[in-house]
Image: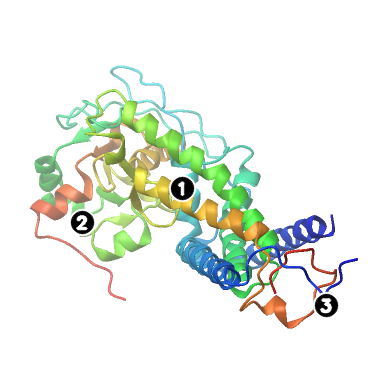
């Protein structure tokens, strides 16, 4: 019977610090990026709402729903970023971040393809297409934004499943359930 | 199962907290406040009646008198290269001439800047009134627009559509279509070619 005090370790001991490091790196990368993007949106939520309408980033009817989305989404991003950075409720926050990325990234791709294939468009390549995606960073090149989102998505997915609680506030209190085999402390 | 439950629970808590904070803070955001019940969807193109100024029904406003088309309209009924629209277009030279006209000084020609706060503060056509469609500024300028002979609306230029939204909203409020003009070159063209720039001091 496995207990929290006698954990079998599946990964070699020399690898464990790498996982700790990767988790902290992912938390910093995803958390800081989302904090920045959310603060840019929070600076002017009306501008964010405008981008939703102009670029059809989300269904615009009913009005109450899309307006509520514009009011709450930047705060949700900021709270998720804070949770990921502090390491409290990290998995839930990472799950929400992943869901947001999975929702918005195809829309950005669709918008890029629409602009690229638009009649009269004269882009040298798909990657030359640039527009304001409403992400809070102004006008961006589509390939760069897609690559950025994919990297964030990988980081968020990793954070959902990572077990390291290194440099996390959550490490200050004990796990409620015994950690499964192979868990990193 | 326990991990999944706590993950979903923390996600729900975050959604609840974000909604609560967003709703609590929104009313105090000043010009960045979002009116939850307003339909922000840009107004659709109004039907164009050749040779007559279009005056669509105004749901809440008083009935407006019919208006004859303005014979002195500028050279532009040509849509911009970027955005097709139903309004008269002005070239930079025409806008300069109108701006220098004494009728501008007595508010018979009104300039409306449809850009956002930051852009307007940084620089605008002297005397232009800020009228950001997204911040609900249009109702505040309707009286001045109704009293004016010409209302010249601009935004950044290029593919910018904010000026078009303002034009269509003015039309909805009963401003005669023949009095509404779009400066398609917009701020980009004005800032590049003119030295007359007004700024809002902080």
What is the distance, in whole Å, between disc 3 and disc 1 at their CAs? 54 Å
Residue highlighted by disc 3 = A5
Q: Chain of mark 2?
A: B
Q: Position of residue B86 (x, y in %)?
A: 32, 27
Q: Residues within 10 Å of mark 1 (few under 14, many from 20)?
A: many
Check the image and report above or below for A66 versus B179. below
Choose between B188 and A185: the one closer to the eye.
A185
Picture quarter with the N terminus of chain A: bottom right
Decide if residue A85 is on the left or right side of residue B72: right
Residue A185 shown left or right of residue B100 in the figure: right
Q: Is residue B104 visible?
A: yes
- Identify the residue at image location x=30%, y=65%: B121
- Front one among A159 and A7: A7
* Pointer 2 residue: B125
Q: Residue at x 23, y 31 (%)?
A: B80
- Residue B1 is marked as none
* Relative image position of residue A67 (x, y in whole percent): 59, 49
Label 3 residue SS: loop
CB-based contact (under 8 Å), mark 3 and mark 2: no
Asked which secondary structure carries label 2, the reply is loop
The residue pinned by badge 1 equals A50
């Amino acid at each position: 019977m496995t207990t929290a005090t006698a954990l079998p370790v599946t990964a070699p001991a020399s690898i464990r610090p790498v996982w700790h490091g990767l988790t902290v790196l992912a938390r910093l990368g995803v958390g800081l990026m989302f904090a920045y993007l959310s603060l840019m949106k929070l600076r002017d939520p009306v501008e964010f709402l405008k981008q939703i309408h102009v670029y059809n980033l989300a269904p615009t009817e009913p009005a109450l729903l899309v307006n509520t989305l514009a009011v709450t989404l930047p705060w949700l991003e900021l709270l998720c970023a804070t949770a990921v950075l502090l390491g409290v409720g990290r998995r839930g926050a990472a799950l929400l971040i992943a869901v947001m990325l999975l929702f918005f990234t195809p829309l950005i791709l669709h918008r890029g393809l629409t602009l690229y294939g638009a009649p009269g468009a004269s882009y040298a390549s798909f990657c030359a297409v640039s527009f304001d995606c409403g992400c809070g960073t102004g006008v961006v090149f589509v390939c760069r934004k897609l690559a950025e989102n994919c990297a964030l998505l990988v980081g968020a997915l990793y954070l959902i499943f990572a077990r390291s609680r290194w440099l996390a506030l959550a490490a200050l209190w004990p796990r409620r359930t015994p950690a499964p085999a192979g868990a990193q402390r | 199962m326990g991990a999944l439950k706590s993950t979903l629970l923390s996600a729900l808590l975050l959604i609840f907290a974000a909604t609560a904070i967003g709703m609590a803070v929104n009313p105090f955001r000043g010009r960045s406040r979002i009116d939850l019940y307003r339909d922000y969807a840009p107004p659709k193109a109004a039907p164009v009646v050749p040779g007559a100024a279009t005056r669509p029904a105004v749901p809440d406003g008083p009935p407006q008198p019919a208006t004859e088309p303005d014979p002195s309209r500028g050279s532009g009924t040509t849509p911009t290269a970027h955005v097709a629209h139903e309004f008269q277009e002005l070239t930079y030279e025409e806008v300069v001439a109108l701006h220098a006209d004494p009728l501008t000084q007595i508010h018979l020609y009104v300039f409306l800047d449809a850009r956002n706060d930051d852009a307007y503060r940084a620089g605008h056509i002297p005397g232009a009134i800020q009228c950001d469609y997204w911040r609900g500024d249009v109702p505040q300028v309707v009286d001045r627009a109704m009293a004016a002979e010409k209302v010249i609306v601009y935004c950044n230029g290029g593919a910018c559509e904010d000026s078009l939204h303002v034009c269509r909203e003015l039309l909805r409020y009963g401003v005669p279509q023949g009095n509404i003009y779009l400066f398609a070159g917009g701020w980009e063209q004005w800032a590049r070619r003119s030295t007359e720039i007004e700024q809002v001091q902080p």
